[in-house]
């Protein structure tokens, strides 16, 4: 990067806005005490990420993100909470050593990543992808040609998960 | 002259061997016939060796024959036999004494339930001893040397249930082994230094006869090491300690092995390898001084002992010292002569002692007395032996001891003085022994009775030999054919008259003193004890040599063993445990990681990733 | 005479035939099982004696059996090589070094089979493992391929683990474990050394125009000749530096690995502690084999692989080897002297006697090497005999503690006599085999290292000390009441005792029977050493 | 610009990781894992636009990731429900019946 | 842009997917049948039909040898969708391995699962194996990161579900939960690495990546490091290499024994197979031996990381097992150690003296397969009889089931790496390669840990042969389980006596340059 020359383009502004939402959401998820609140803040992160995808001109992905994550996954997690310990409150830490070591490890790992990102100078050999409006169309095409095998496999995977989840979660008649 | 019988000399040891094998295989059922077979075996040996001797006396050539024993690459170890005048003579001595002891033992051992075992051992010993004698090279001699040691060990421990016998047997074996190691190393040295790695006596004589083939240092080393072997076997100081203890064996064994034959093997060995000694004055001196010291040292102990056989044992040690001294003085003739006569009279004394013990069932001379009346034959034959030992003319001991003293006087007056002193002591302790046992009144009701003929006849035969054996070599012109025959040149006889006078006087003096003390009581028995109790104690306790050895060797070896044991357990074993412990410890740490906490598992993974990245990739970016 | 019949294979695997027969016998019929096993062990004995009789040192190929076993063509891309392969062969052969040990192994096996009367349970399984063990040890001495050798070596390991663990005395499991781990470690070191050898000296390359045929082999002879011919692989195509060249450091590493591996088995100081427990815990007939044959695999390996492959290094290390040997002799003797348990006395005595083997090896001359082998054979016979007697005594008295024994010569004259005879054989009495091995080893070493030999010779005295101490403690002394009613040896015990003693005497009186067979076995090694000195 | 997105993704990843390693409530742990997976999507989409060789593949990859992650959550929650039935607790640190 | 030249799946191409399609189809049909049939109908036949479909898939794979004969050196690899999917020698052989293992495990599990009261839905447990195996087969064939990820997840989610199906055991639920969380985290880590790899090379195709990585490693060294290290770490979790292994004992313990066997063999093998493709197309190529001097050190560093992982796995796996008294956990730790051994051929790279890493890997994998499945089969029997999986359950097994005990000895001896077994030669080949590559320390660790492992493998033998059982009653061995155990024993011995039979076949069928290194479509 070399220096902190900041070009306040529209993308950057949007990026920062979403970044703030996401980081705040993520941090809140870690610090809030009530489980339901945590889920709500996580949903905020998901939405922020969807916004970021839009900024990156990946509208289809953004759409999927919002639908699947902010929608389905969050609901699923709320179900999970409801069916388990919905009154539960995150208690005071009882494993300080574990938490400190985890924090240190996470921070060091971030340090490594940050170092790697910052020391790299990106010199793309091609201009940024300007997908334009037929983004979804192109994605669809590729999914059904180039990536048809994983696509079909994912359908199998979803079926498996579906059946599995039902069978596992259903109550056994004693 | 043609050698006819000498070619078959190898049969001499084979007869007793055959007897041994027969007894070993069938001995259990042969309590009666077993002894007879063994005796016949030794008789056959005696006859054949006598014939060989006669042939050799007749001037037959020396005869040698053998074959390869081990052949490795370019090296050969051989076995073979040698008939020379020396070996022929020794064969006769050995087989004669063996035969007589066999006969004697038929009577002496007849009540023992393991009599056939006894005779088997004796036969094996006879075989080994004869093998030792006729061996034509040093290795073969060594082999038989060890075998006679084994037989000695077996026979000392014959009454295995007696703790003393067990201890004595063990001691005999181990102490002689110390000397044997010296012998072994000498053997190794000789093998690598001799041209063509030839260990035969002929080659040794040849090589060491010439100067310069082998350096003097090595020669001396070899000689001393060989002598070390002889010291062990012949009970010379400082390895004499086993011999008195060996008296725990049956008395005929003491006569055969520990008086007449095996213990003389040391002398024989030195005589056989004498060219090596001759090439090294230092070695000769060593031999002479060790011999002389042993002679007087053992004689002094003998005075203070109470056990009849122990006295005789120390006497043997002392006489062997004489022989060694003779060898050290360079006179094989004198040494062999004394060996020859000593074999007879000492065997006689032991068998006589055996006869006494057989009768009174004790070995303490203070518990005997007056046996001269009840055991006439034993008494007079014993007297002959004692006089011969004391060096009273014209018995055989006189002549042979005289030859040695003459050599000493000629070469080394100091040694002569020691020899004379030892002779005095010899006469003293023999008279003490004789008078206490046979004179005076019976003590403790030990009246005794004469032994059967089968025991007394050998006594008589030996007594005769003890009388006449000395006449083969007298210090007069024209009578010294023994030395000439044995070594090829006649012994010098200078100043012998003086020696004869002095030694006779000393002998008589000793006997007189003994008579004064023990018969007449003119000098109180405790005269010395009262004034110098420490001296008596010192002599009684044999100069504390056993105690010193125990402290120095046994205790320290045990301490070393214990120390090593601790080392083995804690250091070597500890290292092993440590290695195993490292694995277990790692495993324990790894197991502790398995705390069941999912998040800990995740944390390990993250830490692992961080460390891998930081350590391996990170080094590229520092 | 030999024809093309696979005599060596028959010899090695004949116990397996008996094993198969055993499987069909009912497990409760003790006599049938035992006699099947005994008869089975007689087959290899007969074969090995026959081989011993007809063996001709000048015709080493008379009984060579070689067959392709594992030949694997490997991928060879990225290297300019036409083809490459692993070639591990089934390769058995005899020579003067292995022959005496084969005879020893088959002989001791017969004796141990006879001695198996002491086995009180699960006979069928016992004989199965027993016969497997025999195949293993015969194979070890015959194999001429590194991998094949290793297979047989490990077979003995597994078989012995079971034999100790199931039929041993009180602490058998622990003993079996100790044995397994310690010896496993030894063979692991050996495996590393072997793999290093195969990967370097085992590689041979036939260069052609386009590339070459690269073959990695475990063949002993190939590895040996490659090791001696230093630069056999400079014809590697391309400009790679010879990747198969062994640096001096690697040579030393391999040599030391081999030394340690076989040193553990021998056992060499300070790798001996595992053996104590085995000696103390294993059943008599197994200790007979263990002490009588398996330890010998260590000495055999040292000579065949240590000295045979690296004579030059062996020469440079000779002094250290000799010191280790001498230390073993004295250390073992001193420890044997203070033990209070007879089997431990014998165990330490083995340490001491195996020290003599090292001395013989360290001499690196023909006398010493033959002496070492002689000592191996002799100690094999003697210790087998001793442990047979110990087993018989233990069965009767229920103890091997020296303090609790005594005066057994009266109730058991035959066995006591045998014990005494075996004892004196063990302490190196001339006329018995122990002496010859000891003497030749000393004699050989004396040429080069006089002082070490002289110091080690003190062990001769110590041997007398500890052997007599313990043997006399057991047999001599006043008779003890509780042992008065004990019976002397049964016929089935006496026969192996007498037979072993007969061999001990034979080897003691007429050593040529063995030395002639070994004649020329070490010519290669000696020649190489001489060449070194000349060059 | 790419660096910013990557940094953002790294932040999310590490926060998710921290959450997964420390949160006691099993549902939150699952949520944290989702956060980690989401950060990957950000990477992919960012690379898809600004990468060395920009291509749609990144976006497609992220679609796969999203669907797989959803399936994973479903199964995870189902297992958690079954576990909660037998344990009566949704605290991760109490799921330690098996250890050592 | 190369990637935009998209390739569609044509009709004939479907023929190459027959095994996978067969399995998926069977899975769906059987599941539907299971759901539709009334509860009164017995479900025993479902397991046999599952087995049959696996056998069908295996037959189909064998049939594919006709389409692409790997033994023919000139045959061209069948590549679908620009290497998303490859039918090459490596894929075919590995698919056979996976299918063999799956069939054995299924056969062994038939009776075990039927008798397991903690599994209410037995039919699903069997049918769920089919998508799992499909995932594994996909991993054998794919050379595209996306497909690889999906395959990995298909395998993963199916196995989470299989463990979770043992609902009535709270241990199993705990195991499933642990496994899914750890699995998801590892997936996230792998994905993170993959995303970077995609970013710096612009492709998810391994062939392209292999080609582009040399430049990328020069330009974006740090990111390439992160990418590869993250991928390695993620896969290390899947294969249970230390310190990423801690989940394994818990999960193995909780799962039903056949499922455990599936985890230990199929899951591990599939992850390894995928890792082989990744590593050989990235790290192994980025070494001086291939690209000449001056290449970025990243390749060698990744290999070094793999070596460290291998060493740690061997050491920790073996030593931790020393104190383990639960046989299932013990086998889990043994699996950790074996992961270490299997990592070695990947980690040592190739050089002028050794290029047969794949052969070493495959041979040991096959040996591992047989010995581990065999051991699990015996464990299933013993564990059921004893009611627990503790070591003492094996006491006196020799008296109760002598032949089973004897077979177990062979398997344990093989696991310990002693001759004459497949385990021995597997280790030997790896060892030879390691030494040829001059990685002596790794070789030393291999050998020493093998020796340490004697202790616990033989502790089972000690229990079986040297202890007495509480009961003398004969142990009944269900026929399918017994057959599996004996197939494994015989195969283990066969691999030991005739290692060349498999090795030759493999070395002829698989070559690095054709099967692993993907020719970049220029």
Image (cartoon, rainbow, N blue to C red):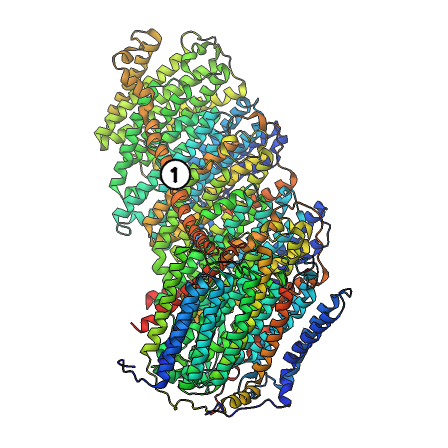
Residue B270 showing in the rendered view: yes
Task: Choose between B592 and C474: the one closer to the eye.
Answer: B592
The quarter holding residue A79 reads bottom right
Q: Is residue D70 above or below residue E331?
A: below
Q: Is residue E301 left or right of B150 when viewed as pictured?
A: left
Does dot 1 land on a helix, a strand or a loop?
Answer: helix
Q: How many neighbours does mark 1 have within 10 angstroms: few (below 14), some (14-19), or many (20 or more)? A: many
- Residue most extreme to the right: E40
Tell me the residue at 64%/72% (across/down): E130
Picture coordinates of residue C423, whole percent (x, y): 49, 39
A86 w.r.t. E10: above or below: above
Place of residue E267 in the rendered image (x, y in percent of width and height, measured from the top left): 56, 69
**Residue at (53, 78) in percent of width and height:** A67
Q: Position of residue B576 (x, y in %)?
A: 42, 49
Label 1: chain letter: B
When the figure is inspected, residue E7 is found, relative to residue C332, above or below; the finding is below
Q: In the image as oriented, which residue stretches furthest toward the left?
A: B413
Say if B337 sits above or below A61 in the image.
above
**Depth check, front residue: B549 or E483:** E483
From the image, tell me which residue sits under label 1: B561
Give the total number of marks visible in the rendering.
1
Q: Residue at x 33, y 7 (%)?
A: B520
Q: Give coordinates of residue C72: x percent, y percent.
A: 55, 75
Compared across the picture, whether C476 is left or right of E484 comes to: left
- For the N terminus of chain E, the quadrant is bottom left
Residue E419 visible at all: no
Viewer-proximal residue, C154 or E266? E266
Q: Nearer the viewer, residue C428 or B594?
A: B594
């Amino acid at each position: 990067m070399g220096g902190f020359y900041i070009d306040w383009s529209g993308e950057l502004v949007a990026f920062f806005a979403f970044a703030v939402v996401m980081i705040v959401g993520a941090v809140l998820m870690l610090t809030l005490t009530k489980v339901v609140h945590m889920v709500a803040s996580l949903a905020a992160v998901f939405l922020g990420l969807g916004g970021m995808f839009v900024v990156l001109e990946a509208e289809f992905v953004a759409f999927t993100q919002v639908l699947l994550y902010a929608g389905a996954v969050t609901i699923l997690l709320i179900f999970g909470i409801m069916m388990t310990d919905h009154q539960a409150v995150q208690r005071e830490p009882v494993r300080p050593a574990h938490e400190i070591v985890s924090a240190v490890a996470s921070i060091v790992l971030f340090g490594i990543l940050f170092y790697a990102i910052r020391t790299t100078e990106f010199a793309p050999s091609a201009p940024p992808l300007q997908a334009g409006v037929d983004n979804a169309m192109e994605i669809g095409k590729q999914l059904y040609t180039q990536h048809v095998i994983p696509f079909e496999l994912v359908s199998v995977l979803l079926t498996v998960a579906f059946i599995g989840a039902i069978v596992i979660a259903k109550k056994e008649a004693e | 002259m043609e050698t006819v019988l000498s070619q078959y000399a190898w049969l001499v040891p084979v007869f007793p061997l055959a007897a041994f094998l027969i007894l070993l295989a069938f001995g259990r059922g042969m309590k009666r016939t077993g002894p007879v077979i063994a005796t016949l075996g030794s008789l056959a040996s005696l006859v054949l060796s006598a014939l060989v001797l006669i042939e050799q006396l007749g001037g037959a050539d020396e005869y040698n024959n053998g074959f390869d024993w081990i052949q490795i690459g370019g090296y050969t170890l051989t076995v073979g036999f040698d008939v020379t005048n020396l070996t022929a003579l020794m064969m006769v001595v050995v087989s004669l004494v063996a035969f007589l002891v066999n006969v004697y033992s038929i009577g002496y051992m007849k009540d023992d339930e393991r009599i056939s075992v006894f005779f088997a051992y004796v036969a094996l010993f006879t075989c080994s001893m004869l093998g030792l004698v006729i061996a034509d090279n040093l290795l073969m001699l060594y082999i038989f040397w060890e075998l006679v040691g084994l037989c000695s060990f077996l026979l000392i421990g014959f009454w295995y249930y007696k703790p003393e016998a067990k201890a004595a047997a063990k001691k005999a074996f181990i102490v002689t082994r110390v000397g044997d190691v010296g012998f072994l190393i000498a053997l190794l040295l000789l093998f690598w230094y001799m041209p063509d790695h030839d260990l035969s006596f002929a080659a040794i004589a040849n090589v060491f006869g010439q100067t310069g083939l082998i350096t003097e240092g090595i020669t001396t080393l070899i000689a001393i090491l060989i002598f070390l072997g002889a010291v062990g076997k012949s009970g010379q100081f400082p390895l004499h300690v086993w011999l008195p203890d060996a008296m725990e064996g049956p008395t005929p064994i003491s006569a055969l092995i520990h008086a007449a034959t095996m213990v003389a093997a040391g002398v024989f060995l030195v005589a056989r390898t004498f060219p090596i000694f001759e090439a090294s004055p230092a070695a000769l001196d060593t031999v002479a001084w060790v011999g002389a010291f042993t002679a007087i040292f053992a004689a002094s102990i003998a005075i203070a002992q109470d056990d009849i056989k122990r006295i005789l044992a120390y006497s043997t040690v002392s006489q062997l010292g004489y022989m060694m001294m003779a060898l050290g003085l360079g006179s094989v003739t004198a040494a062999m002569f004394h060996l020859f006569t000593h074999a007879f009279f000492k065997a006689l004394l032991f068998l006589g002692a055996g006869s006494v013990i057989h009768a009174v069932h004790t070995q303490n001379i203070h518990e005997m007395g007056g046996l001269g009346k009840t055991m006439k034959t034993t008494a007079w034959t014993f007297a002959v032996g004692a006089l011969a030992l004391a060096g009273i003319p014209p018995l055989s001991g006189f002549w042979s001891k005289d030859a040695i003293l003459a050599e000493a006087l000629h070469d080394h007056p100091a040694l002569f003085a020691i020899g004379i002193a030892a002779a005095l002591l010899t006469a003293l302790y023999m008279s003490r022994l004789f008078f206490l046992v046979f004179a005076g009144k019976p003590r403790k009701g030990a009246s005794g009775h004469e032994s059967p003929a089968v025991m007394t006849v050998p006594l008589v035969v030996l007594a005769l030999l003890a009388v006449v054996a000395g006449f083969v070599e007298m210090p007069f012109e024209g009578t010294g054919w023994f030395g000439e025959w044995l070594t090829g040149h006649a012994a010098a006889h200078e100043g012998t008259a003086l020696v004869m006078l002095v030694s006779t006087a000393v002998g008589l003096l000793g006997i007189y003193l003994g008579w004064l003390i023990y018969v007449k009581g003119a000098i109180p028995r405790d005269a010395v004890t009262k004034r110098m109790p420490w001296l008596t104690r010192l002599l009684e306790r044999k100069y504390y040599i056993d105690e010193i050895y125990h402290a120095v060797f046994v205790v320290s070896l045990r301490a070393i063993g214990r120390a090593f044991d601790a080392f083995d357990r804690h250091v070597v074993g500890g290292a092993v445990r440590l290695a195993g412990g490292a694995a277990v410890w790692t495993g324990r740490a790894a197991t502790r990681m398995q705390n069941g906490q999912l998040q800990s598992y995740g944390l390990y993974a993250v830490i692992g990733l961080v460390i891998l990245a930081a350590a391996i990739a990170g080094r590229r970016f520092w | 005479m030999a024809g093309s019949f696979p005599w060596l294979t028959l010899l090695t695997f004949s116990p397996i035939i008996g094993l198969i027969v055993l499987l069909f016998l009912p497990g409760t019929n003790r006599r049938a099982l035992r006699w099947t096993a005994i008869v089975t062990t007689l087959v290899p004995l007969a074969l090995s004696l026959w081989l011993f009789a007809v063996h001709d040192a000048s015709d080493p190929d008379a009984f060579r059996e070689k067959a392709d076993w594992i030949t694997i063509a490997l991928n060879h891309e990225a290297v300019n090589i036409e083809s490459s392969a692993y070639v591990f062969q089934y390769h058995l052969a005899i020579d003067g070094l292995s022959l005496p040990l084969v005879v020893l192994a088959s002989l001791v096996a017969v004796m141990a089979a006879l001695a198996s009367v002491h086995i009180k349970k699960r006979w069928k399984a016992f004989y199965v493992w027993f016969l497997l063990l025999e195949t293993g040890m015969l194979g070890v001495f015959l194999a001429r391929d590194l991998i094949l050798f290793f297979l047989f070596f490990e077979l003995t390991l597994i078989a012995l683990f079971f034999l100790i663990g199931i039929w041993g005395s009180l602490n058998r499991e622990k003993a079996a474990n100790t044995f397994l781990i310690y010896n496993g470690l030894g063979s692991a070191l050996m495996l590393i050394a072997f793999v290093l050898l195969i990967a370097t000296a085992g590689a041979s390359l036939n260069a052609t125009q386009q590339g070459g045929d690269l073959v990695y082999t475990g063949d002993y002879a190939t590895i040996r000749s490659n090791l001696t011919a230093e630069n056999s692989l400079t014809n590697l195509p391309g400009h790679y530096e010879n990747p198969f060249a062994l640096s001096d450091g690697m040579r030393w590493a391999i040599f030391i690995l081999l030394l340690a591996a076989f040193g553990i088995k021998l056992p060499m100081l300070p790798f001996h502690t595992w053996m104590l427990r085995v000696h103390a815990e294993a059943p008599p007939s197994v200790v007979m084999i263990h002490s009588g044959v398996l330890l010998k695999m260590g000495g055999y390996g040292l000579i065949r692989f240590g000295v045979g492959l690296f004579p030059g290094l062996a020469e440079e290390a000779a002094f250290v080897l000799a010191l280790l040997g001498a230390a073993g002799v004295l250390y073992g003797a001193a420890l044997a002297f203070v033990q209070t348990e007879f089997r431990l006395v014998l165990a330490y005595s083995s340490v001491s006697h195996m020290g003599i083997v090292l001395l013989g090896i360290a001499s690196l001359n023909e006398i010493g090497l033959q002496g070492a082998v002689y000592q191996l054979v002799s100690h094999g016979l003697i210790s087998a005999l001793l442990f047979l007697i110990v087993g018989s005594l233990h069965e009767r008295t229920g103890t091997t503690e020296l303090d609790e024994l005594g005066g057994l010569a009266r109730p058991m004259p035959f066995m006591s006599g045998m014990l005494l005879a075996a004892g004196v054989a063990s302490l190196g009495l001339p006329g018995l085999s122990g002496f010859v091995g000891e003497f030749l080893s000393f004699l050989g070493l004396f040429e080069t290292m006089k002082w070490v030999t002289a110091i080690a010779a003190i062990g001769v005295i110590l041997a007398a000390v500890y052997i007599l101490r313990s043997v006399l403690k057991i047999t001599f002394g006043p008779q003890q009441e509780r042992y008065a009613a004990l019976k002397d040896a049964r016929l089935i015990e006496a026969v192996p005792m007498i037979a072993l003693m007969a061999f001990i005497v034979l080897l003691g009186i007429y050593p040529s029977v063995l030395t002639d067979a070994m004649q020329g076995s070490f010519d290669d090694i000696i020649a190489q050493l001489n060449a070194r000195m000349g060059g | 610009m790419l660096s910013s997105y990557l940094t953002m993704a790294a932040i999310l990843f590490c926060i998710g990781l921290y959450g997964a390693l420390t949160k006691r409530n099993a549902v939150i742990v699952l949520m944290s894992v989702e956060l980690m997976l989401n950060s990957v999507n950000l990477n992919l989409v960012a690379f898809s636009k600004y990468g060395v060789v920009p291509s749609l593949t990144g976006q497609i990859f992220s679609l796969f990731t999203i669907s797989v992650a959803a399936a994973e959550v479903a199964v995870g929650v189902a297992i958690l429900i079954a576990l909660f039935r037998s344990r009566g607790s949704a605290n991760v640190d109490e799921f330690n019946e098996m250890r050592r | 842009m190369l990637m935009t030249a998209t390739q569609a799946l044509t009709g004939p191409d479907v023929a190459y997917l027959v095994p996978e399609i067969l399995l998926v189809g069977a899975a769906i049909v059987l599941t539907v049948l299971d759901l539709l049939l009334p509860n009164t109908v017995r479900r025993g036949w479902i397991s046999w039909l599952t087995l049959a479909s696996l056998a069908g898939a295996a037959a189909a794979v064998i049939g594919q040898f006709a389409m692409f004969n790997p033994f023919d050196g000139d045959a061209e690899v069948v590549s679908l969708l620009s290497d998303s999917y490859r039918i090459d020698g490596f894929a075919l052989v590995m698919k056979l391995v996976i299918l063999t293992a799956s069939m054995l495990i299924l056969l062994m599990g038939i009776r075990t699962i039927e008798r397991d009261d903690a599994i209410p839905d037995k039919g699903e447990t069997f049918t769920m194996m089919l998508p799992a195996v499909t995932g594994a087969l996909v991993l054998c064939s794919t050379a595209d990161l996306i497909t690889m990820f999906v395959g990995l997840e298909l395998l993963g989610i199916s196995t989470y579900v299989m463990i979770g199906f043992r609902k009535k055991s709270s241990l199993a639920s705990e195991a499933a939960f642990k496994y899914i969380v750890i699995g998801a985290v590892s997936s996230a880590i792998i994905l993170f690495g993959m995303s970077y790899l995609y970013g710096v090379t612009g492709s998810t195709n391994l062939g392209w990546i292999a080609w582009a990585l040399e430049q990328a490693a020069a330009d974006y060294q740090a990111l390439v490091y992160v990418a590869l290290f993250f991928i390695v770490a993620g896969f290390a979790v899947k294969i249970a290499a230390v310190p990423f292994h801690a989940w394994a004992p818990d999960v193995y313990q909780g799962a039903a024994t056949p499922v455990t066997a599936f985890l230990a063999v199929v899951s591990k093998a599939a992850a390894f197979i995928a890792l082989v493709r990744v590593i050989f197309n990235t790290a192994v190529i980025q070494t001086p031996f291939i690209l000449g001097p001056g290449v970025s050190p990243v390749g060698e560093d990744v290999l070094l990381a793999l070596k460290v992982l291998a060493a740690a796995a061997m050491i920790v796996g073996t030593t931790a097992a020393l104190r383990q008294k639960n046989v299932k956990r013990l086998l889990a730790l043994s699996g950790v150690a074996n992961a270490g051994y299997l990592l070695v051929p990947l980690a040592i790279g190739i050089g002028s003296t050794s290029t047969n890493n794949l052969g070493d890997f495959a041979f040991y994998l096959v040996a591992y397969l047989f010995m581990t499945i065999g051991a699990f089969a015996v464990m299933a029997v013993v564990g059921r009889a004893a009611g627990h999986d503790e070591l003492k359950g094996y006491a006196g097994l020799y008296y109760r089931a002598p032949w089973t005990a004897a077979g177990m000895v062979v398997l344990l001896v093989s696991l310990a790496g002693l001759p004459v077994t497949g385990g021995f030669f597997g280790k030997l080949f790896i060892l030879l390669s390691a030494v040829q590559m001059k990685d002596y320390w790794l070789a030393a660790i291999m050998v020493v840990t093998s020796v340490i492992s004697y202790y616990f493998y033989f502790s089972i033998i000690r229990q079986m042969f040297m202890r007495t059982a509480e009961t003398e009653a004969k142990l009944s061995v269900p026929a399918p389980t017994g057959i599996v155990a004996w197939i494994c024993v015989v195969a283990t011995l066969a691999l030991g006596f005739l290692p060349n039979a498999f090795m030759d076949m493999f070395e002829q069928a698989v070559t690095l340059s054709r099967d692993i290194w993907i020719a970049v479509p220029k």
